[in-house]
Amino acid sequence: MPTEGHPDNHFQLSYDLRSRRGIDLLLNTRIIKGVFALLCMGILLSASLAQQTPAPATAKQSQEDRTALHQALLDLTNPWTVMCIAAHPDDEDGTSLIVMRRKHGAHTVSLFTTFGEGGQNAIGPELYEELGAIRIRETKAASEIQGSEPYFLGLKDFGYSKSAEEAFRIWGHEESLRRMVLQIRKLRPDVIITNHDTSRGHGHHQATGQLILEAFDAAADPKQFPDQLRWDIQPWQVQRLFVRAFGGAPASSGQKPEGVLVTIDPNERDAIRGTIFAEQALQALQQHATQGPWPRTVADMARSRNSPDGKLPLVRYRLVRAAKDVDALPENSHNLLDGLRWREDSAKELAPPTIDGRPLTEFIDQPNRVLAALVDAEKKRVTKPVENASTTSADPRVMRMRRIFNSALAAVTGVSAKILSDQAVLPPEARTTFHFVVSNNGTVEIKASSVIFGAGYTDGHVIMSPVASLNTRLPPGGMARVPITYQVPAKTALTTPVAEHLYEERTDGYPLAASVLVEVQGVKFEVQTRRAIDIAAAVEITEISPRPLVLSFRKSVKPPVLRLKLTNYTAAPVKVGILPWSSFRKFTPQDCQYDIGARAQISVTCAIGGLEVPPPFGKNSVLSTERVNLPVQDLRTKSVVGFGHFQTVWTGAEVAQGVSVGYIRGFDYSVPNALAALGVPAKELTIADVRAADLQQYSAIMVDNRVYESQPQLIAANQRLLDYAKDGGTLIVFYHKSNEWNPDPRRNRPQLAPYPIILGDERVTDENAPVTVMAPGHPLLSVPNKIEQSDFNGWIQERGLYYPKEWDGQYYALLSTNDPGEESLNGGLLVADYGRGHYIYTSMVWYRQLRAGVPGAYSMLANMISYGK
């Protein structure tokens, strides 16, 4: 059965937009041009038909088919589009999107300002662009559950911000508005909802809230960004704009905050799917795994919100903008679309069919009656003249509802189509064969006649062209297969690795689209399908580690060794060589030549010689960085067939003699990589090691970021770490969130530090905020490296987060910093003597600085692990 997703998901099929009449007009008037286009694109067609043995017809639907049919028929009843705009993935209001789609049949889309690449990663080491690529996948998975379509503006997530002004300094106000207006004009929402206002919370949220208000008017004004107005893009007037009203009374109280006009109940049950809408929304939210951990159940969510009856509070929205002449929203509304009217002539053309005056959704267990009603409605539409046809045919809602009608016909007849490919990744100029398959999984015979196919974008659209005329009948259980040989154009832009192309216009890969014209009981309709493949270099460096490559000029420099994964995406074996170079000097490859089989992947090591130790500039802790490029050369043709890069980082930080470190790793490898760069013997400790191993063999033990959350078993074993410090060791703990650290009897979490430390939610987001060294002579700041103001230069993203708000008098607070206009936060680096040993807690984001190769981070790390030596 066709999937439940919207029929115009992710990209438009251009024949709808150019001809405005769909496939019939395309096939009748454009077939010659289409064949010529195929030749130009390099599509070579060999069409054959493979019929499966017909399966016995069955009248019983699977639950999946039943659910899909219900949604397809419900979609027929609602011509409106609801858009949710959010700053980051997981900021969207999944509950309202689900209710509007699953209950009311609205077309739903989400628009995200950023990819969320500046956030934290709760499940792995990826950060920045690599994290953004993961969050795109997470967002798509969440959107599948929500029944919505995700889109991105692609503005940079530079980390937590406290003001819209800072966001606009990075994004550019005019560019941000231009992108949002363009997406509104493309997606044509009738209603926009958002969780963001202009004054609360994250600066990205505030800036997004401001952009929405401005774009509401600008999208409808032809004088705003007139260069966008071409082909199918025209000014678009959103009908209503709602902003979430947070807080308020519980669902059971009956109270209504002033100005709230629409409430949506997340506790309502979806009778078709058998779950409440909140459960579906939580399942979608859990797809954003990098931003977890999330509640496991709706009951957990209700408990966390202290709900007295176990129910979640109502979702409340205030109407803040409305277009002129839009009817007023009824009082006590539970539907964001209440009162909107469809244009009369369009409504006549595509009013949803009924059976005995009742909606088709009431007859999903009688698919034959539903099919008869749809067939009858289509015959009447084709034979009945339409008033103002030139106007209605150009109505974008009419065009979308035509596609929805086709999807309903496909759902009730059990007709599905898909594009199969043996390869998910292709290089430019590669020739491959896609297989277009149309299947009849229903109970009535169909006729499949014409297939059209398109690949790649032209002026923002997939250009569709005829490739086959089947003229074949498919009985129930029948299947037709059309092989389509296609050559990727030579100048096709690469789409992978996604992290390398994150800020380019498209993150969905290289699009493929196909459609077949189907006839059943005398009516014709098209069944569409689409998928994407990735375009990669012929030989791609899919992994490089370590990144960055940190080297110390305090030690003799050996040729550094990189661990690489090389993937050959071509259909022939290849012999390649890695030829590193930088803008400053050439490097010497050593044993970096490899044979890779056709469409194969290998893991290799490559020693890079010729690296010169840079001279120290001034103080010992100076560090320099250099980008080293890694062209992959085909040794037969001497042409470059792939590319990669890594960063070299040089540090002069010193470490005390005799230091050895045990560490409990968090989500990334910043700590072990930095320890290796400093030449320190180090071992990763498991929870079992903490419970039973001889910890006194280590002069210092490090608990990495948020380990008490990622490995909660450590809480029960924490006393062994405290005993280790008391007996003479140095215990170092990197930052945790307040709700992961502070004592909590509900989670059996005691005070985790030897003397009390209570964390708050304060943070310093200005990476250039002044840092005051409060105790310059303290050993932690002077041995073996003298920490000075210059060590806090060149930081990225932020200074620190979740700063302690209370701490025992046994601690020395060594650093003070603050964002402009705010009070100083003094608890970013706390140290205390404990028994014969020492305890250090720090809220500074050292791990980001270590990863980025910031000089002071390595000097400070060296001092922390050397403390007491």
Image: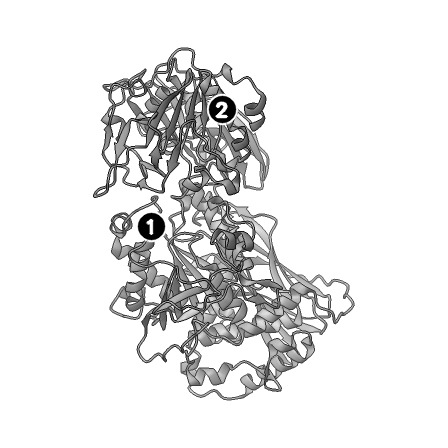
- Residue 510 visible in the snapshot: yes
Residue 522 in percent (x, y) is at 64, 81
Residue 337 in percent (x, y) is at 43, 74
Is 23 or 224 nearer to us in this picture? 224
Q: Is residue 787 above or below residue 640?
A: above
Q: Which residue is mark 2?
A: 721
For the N terminus, which image quadrant?
bottom right
Mark toward the start of the polypeptide (1 vs 2): 1
- Residue 589 visible in the snapshot: no
Which secondary structure lies at badge 2? Answer: helix
Residue that protrudes farthest toward the left in the picture: 821
Q: Is residue 616 above or below residue 468?
A: above
Tell me: 788 left or right of 287. Answer: left
Residue 540 in percent (x, y) is at 49, 38
Which of the 4 image quadrants contains residue 151?
A: bottom left
Residue that protrudes farthest toward the top in the picture: 657
Which secondary structure lies at badge 1? Answer: loop
